[in-house]
Amino acid sequence: MHEKRVLIVEDEKMIAELERDYLEASGFEADIAADGREGMRKYVSETYDFIILDVMLPEIDGFELCRAIRMGSDVPVMMVTARKEDVDKIRGLGLGADDYMIKPFSPPEMVARVKAHINMHEKLKTSGKDDRRAEKNEIRIGELRMVPDEYRVYIGEKEVNLVKKEFDLLLFLAMNRGIVFSKDSIFEKVWGMDVVSDSSTVTVHINRIREKLREADPSHEYIETLWGAGYRAK
């Protein structure tokens, strides 16, 4: 099995080299790009299993680079920033980032997240589609229809455009309709992390899914909140 390759797009040299050193010590192969344009060139010309994007980059910022990556790839992406504003986190996750870390962060935690995302991504690639076919070719909740093999969601005849992690989360709830899951358990099942948990990431994704579903069908709430307990598809 080849070493997993990680692309680090970070303009602060010391931080980039620290991330690289910890990843390499954990068995990864890591490349560094010092600005967004170089990061784009490396992404286009090479193959990576994971991408770490700083938000504030010269040339092309992390948001634009994340958007470009998501147009052609489902490779796991984690965004990092020194800014603590929730709006940045919401924007990054809304563009399709799988995770978000605030500087300064623990390098071992970063490595743990990288491992978890890669493991979950490979699990979904190798077994997810077969498992979903075994369940149903389509999953329905009232007017909502999900086609897992095509990563498509419809309400009636309207298609609802979800980014990959939003789709994965909604699919998980839909396949377990009626069961209540806490934020931590959703994070574990959908993100593949049971130790490195960030329940606010789940909240952001749930809210974005709801907004998109309401635009297509304002008459029905497909995800129910049970305060103090969690969420369920209904």
Image (tube, rainbow, N blue to C red):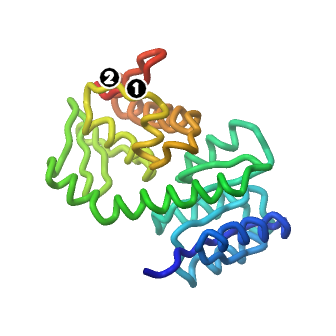
Q: Amino acid at mark 1?
A: Tyr
Residue at left 75%, top 37%? 85
What quarter of the picture does the C terminus occupy? top left
Residue topped by disc 1: 231
Look at the numbered discs 1 and 2 and tell me whether their residues touch, using CB distance below 8 Å: no
Check the picture and name the quadrant holding the N terminus.
Answer: bottom left
Q: Residues within 10 Å of mark 2 (few under 14, many from 20)?
A: few
Q: Nearer the viewer, mark 1 or mark 2?
A: 1
Tell me if mark 1 has few (under 14), some (14-19) or many (20+) residues whose alpha carbon lies within 10 angstroms of its own.
many
Q: Residue at x 62, y 59 (%)?
A: 111
Viewer-proximal residue among 233 and 126: 126
Residue 220 - label? 2
Q: Position of residue 96 (x, y in %)?
A: 53, 53
- The secondary structure type at the circle numbered 1 is strand
Number of on-image labels: 2
Of the residues shown, which amino acid type is indicated by label 2? Answer: His
Viewer-proximal residue, 136 or 219?
136
- Image location (x, y in percent) of residue 129: 25, 59
- For the point 73% across and 75% down, the residue is 33
- Ranked by sequence position, the earlier of labels 1 and 2 is 2
